[in-house]
Image (cartoon, helix red, strand yellow):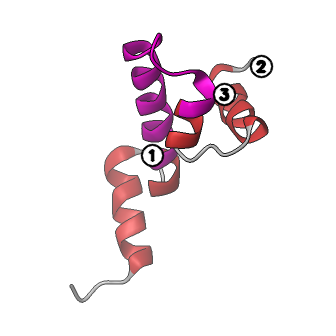
Amino acid sequence: VPVSERYLQVLFKKQTGLSPTAYARITRFNHLFLEYARQKDAHDLAFIRALYNYYDASHFNKDFRKFFGQA
């Protein structure tokens, strides 16, 4: 494809209203909560956080606070 990565990022933002990074973060966070709700008894939250590349609690807490406005 003869276009730059930056051009694709701009087109993505025009179509969705979000940057690709913000969209990926929201999607990852949404999948984490769906997995937690689906398998609440089978896995603890620390395991599911690690499964979705939140390797420490502070990283997860930062995103949680950003999306929900509280810790």
Name which residue lies at 38% across and 75% down.
7
Of callouts 2 and 1, which one flags the residue occurring earlier in the amino acid sequence? 1
Q: Nearer the viewer, residue 37 or 68?
A: 37
Judging by the rendered image, the residue that carries numbered circle 2 is 71
Instruction: Kindly check if marks 2 and 1 are in contact, taking CB atoms under 8 A apart as contact.
Output: no
Name which residue lies at 72% across and 26% down.
65
- Percent position of residue 16, x then y: 35, 45
- Inter-mark Cα distance, 3 to 2: 7 Å
Queried whether the magenta region covers residue 12, the answer comes back as: no
- Percent position of residue 45, x then y: 59, 23
Which residue type does callout 3 highlight? Answer: Phe
Label 2 crowd (10 A; few <14 / some 14-19 / many >=20): few
Residue 59 image-quadrant placement: top right
- Inter-mark Cα distance, 3 to 1: 15 Å
Q: Quadrant of the C terminus?
A: top right
Which residue type does callout 1 highlight? Answer: Tyr
Judging by the rendered image, the residue that carries numbered circle 3 is 64
Name which residue lies at 47% across and 30% down.
32
Element assignment for label 2: loop
Name above or below for residue 28 compared with residue 61: below
Instruction: Kindly check if marks 3 and 2 are in contact, taking CB atoms under 8 A apart as contact.
Output: yes
Which residue type does callout 2 highlight? Answer: Ala
Front position among marks 2 and 1? 2
Element assignment for label 1: helix
Q: Which residues are magenta?
A: 23-47
